Amino acid sequence: MSLPRYAARRALVGAGQVVGVATVVFVLTEALPGDAAVVIAGDQPDPARIALLRDQLDLDRPAWQRYLDWLADLVVGDLGVSLVSQRPVAGVLAAGAAPTVLLAAATLLLLVPLSVGLGMLAARREGGRLDRALSATAVGLYAVPEFALALLLVAVFGIRLAWLPPTAVGTGGDLLSRPAVLVLPLVVLLARPFCSLSRLTRAGMIEAMRAEHVAHARRLGVPERRLRLVHALPNALAPVAQQLARTTDWLLGGVIVVEAVFVVPGLGTALVDAVTARDVPTVQGLCVLVAVTTVTVNLAADLVAFRLAPRAGAAA
């Protein structure tokens, strides 16, 4: 199968997945108990506000009509209007996206060279000190939940030792104005994916170096460095690319936990606030955004895996 044909097939599957997630999100928000307009209006609802909310939510119309209209709006990028701030949901998400994107991008930029580099070094001397140390560290770190590690780091380095800021309070969302506030959140976000990616790289490199084509190239006198970087590494990175996509999916949830612990005003905070206030359009918009991001990242990872190892990509 050619790469364009494979990409088209995966894109169609991804579009169906986004529609499926959007459908589930709509059904779940519809299934919430009680009258949404009364709940959103507060403990002492004003009849005029309730009427306005019912009009905004189109609660007097059949659910299937509202669902079809919502899907049609999603196609043109209209995520609706926030019931709390009366701002477009797209604007609410854009306002909170910068800290979240910064944390996720910085995590990925550090994660790839660290995990791949250490994984290759560990594979170079299988069973050596570095290999055993990496294995022990990976098992230990992977067993610690993100929120527990975050609280531990805040207690030790943020409060007791006072080496680093314990929260991002006072930055106004501009994390780069105080880069020190990024250190603890990045350590938390890097811990678990570093363990999985480094171990996967190690296993992939060991298997690739034992492959017949690598052994044949070695018999032809190809230098060991070229064997590792040119002949073995591409095959080892095919599963790593797919695992990196799953790691990016995990980051979407991990960032929410990190933002809550370190008081970072990003998309995670926006989601918590929207759920608390029962801001249905904002919750729906965030869920669709996560779905689109997940599908896009996995599509890119599948294409990379297909290019590096076509058989592995086609079977994915």
Image (cartoon, grey):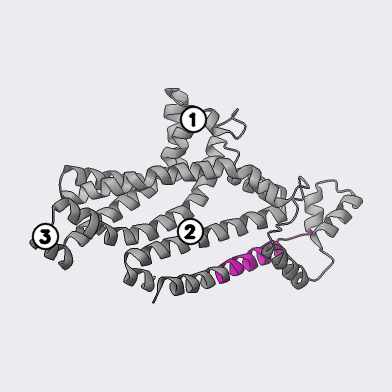
Res 81 visible: yes
Distance Cα–Cα, label 2 vs label 3 = 36 Å
Residue 72 on image: x %, y %: 71, 67
Q: Say how many tags the image has.
A: 3
Q: Closest to the observer: 45 or 90?
A: 90
Question: Which residue does the image show at 34% across and 52% down from the upper left?
Answer: 196
> Relative to 60, is 240 above or below?
above
Distance Cα–Cα, label 2 vs label 1 = 27 Å
Q: Closest to the observer: 33 or 72?
A: 72
Question: Which residue does the image show at 52% across and 69% down from the upper left?
Answer: 11
Quarter of the picture containing the C terminus is: bottom left
- Circle 3 SS class: helix
Question: What residue is disc 1 on?
Answer: 179
Which numbered disc flags the more N-terminal residue, 2 or 1? 1
Question: What residue is disc 3 on?
Answer: 218
> Relative to 271, is 237 above or below?
below
- Circle 1 SS class: helix
Q: What stretch is highlighted in magenta?
A: 16-35
What is the chief secondary structure element of the magenta stretch? helix
Amino acid identity at mark 2: Val
Residue 166 on image: x %, y %: 50, 29
- Circle 2 SS class: helix
Which of discs 2 and 3 lies nearer the camera? The answer is: 3
216 left or right of 68? left
Mark 2 surroundings: few (<14), some (14-19) or many (≥20) residues within 10 A: some
Residue 251 on image: x %, y %: 48, 50
Amino acid identity at mark 3: Arg
77 left or right of 242? right
Q: Closest to the observer: 297 or 132?
A: 297
Mark 1 and mark 3 in contact? Answer it, CB < 8 Å. Answer: no
